[in-house]
Image: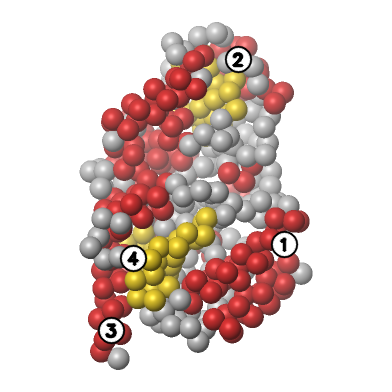
Amino acid sequence: MEKFIALIMVKIAWFFTWPLPVKKNKILFISYFESKLTGNFKLISKELKKSDVDYEMVFMIRKFKNTLWAKFKYLFNFAVQTYHINTSAVVLLDGNNFPVSNIKKKEETKVIQIWHACGGIKKFGCDINRRFPIKNYDYVYVAGEAFIESFSTAFDISKDKIIPLGVAKTDILYDKDKMEGYKNEMYRKYPVLKGKKVILYAPTFRGDGAFELKYVNLDMAYLSRKLGEEYAIIYKMHPFLERIALDKNTSENIINANKVDIYKLFSVADVLISDYSAIIFDYSILEKPMLLYVPDLEEYERDRGFYYDYSQLAPGPVCRSEKEIINTILTGSYDLEKVRGMKHKFFDHHDGKSAKRVAEHIEKLVSQGKAQAKKI
């Protein structure tokens, strides 16, 4: 029923806005992961503003919330998105978009998928069962050539349209001054972190994200007791799970950082604990140790599936219990060679200029669109 209502809303909006002309300098940004301009979109728009061209940039940044009222309000957001899609020269997405995939797209409008994650471990997109199709993408930007195969099948797009320009937000991780500033900011906000070894726990969600959300619980209170006062634990759930505060785990040495940018947390983390989340790709850039907590590995592989042999991909010890995590941390049994191997296998660019490359490609598409319009 939800899908049917959304489809009707989008089709009506499309019918009334299709006759409107495409604005040749208009660039639309759509995200349902954030409530404000940040990350890839913030850095890309900043680069575009440096251009001699006066772009009209429209930002539809609205975090999706899995509640009945939020879904109802999002239906009207779909209608507005459809209007902007029909009148934009370029549409940038950081996640799959219902209107884009369910309307007839104008040929002069170029839709670019700038996926919110640096890569994919778990299968996604067209490679899993979906509630609506994925189509109408013209290009997908990725971190490196190693992702071309998986992103091609995930987005059902030819490999020559997968462009390894790098991921804009990772420019921050290559900026030592920026990361040092983040670290100082974190110490001011959380003075308890100073002088401690910081463990960052950042897992992904289970389920489909929109209609089913689950997570694997990690007993952080137990970890904190066993590791002792020398350690502090920060946890950040996936954006879909931010409402899970896990207050029963909080103490002076256990910090709920659900509202803090993940790269700021990277700046103070000594060790990352994650699972099937693509943030392990981002974290590998810093060449810091990590371990993987995957008590549901066989179940997850059976139900969701991976693009890689997980045990071969994992850039650190694979742990099935809290006791294994504690032993790994206390003995320092990490594998930094695998971390560096991940960094250089999956990222083609290490110059901190990915946002510039992305912006230049977008400008090229806008310029080509103008030239074609003049011929017509």
Disc 1/disc 2 C-alpha distance (Å):
39 Å
Which x, y percent locates residue 323?
A: 60, 19
Q: Amino acid at mark 3?
A: Gln
Instruction: State if disc 2 and disc 1 touch (CB < 8 Å).
Output: no
Q: Are marks 2 and 4 in contact (CB under 8 Å)?
A: no
Inspect this view and state whether residue 324 appears. Answer: no
Single out the residue that lies furthest toward the front: 54
Pick whichever, 228 or 235, lies toward us: 235
Whole-angstrom CA distance, mark 1 to mark 4, is 32 Å
Residue 343 lies, in percent from the top left, at: 33, 40
Circle 1 crowding by C-alpha within 10 Å: few under 14, some 14–19, many from 20 = few
First in residue order: circle 3 vs circle 4: 4
Q: Which residue is mark 3?
A: 372
Residue appearing at x 26%, y 86% in the figure? 374
Which residue is the site of mark 1? Answer: 72
The answer to whether the residues at label 1 and label 4 have Cβ atoms under 8 Å apart is no
Q: Which residue is mark 4?
A: 55
N-term mark: 3 or 2? 2
Q: Residues within 10 Å of mark 2 (few under 14, many from 20)?
A: few
As helix, strand or loop, the secondary structure at mark 1 comes to helix
Q: Is residue 302 left or right of residue 176?
A: right
| Res. 26 in view | yes
Name the mark on residue 252. 2
Task: Give the number of marks.
Answer: 4
Do the CB atoms of the residues marked 1 and 3 lie less than 8 Å apart? Answer: no
310 sits to left or right of 340: right
Which residue is more in the foreground, 271 or 13? 13
Q: Secondary structure at mark 2?
A: loop
Q: Which element carries disc 4, helix, strand or loop? A: loop
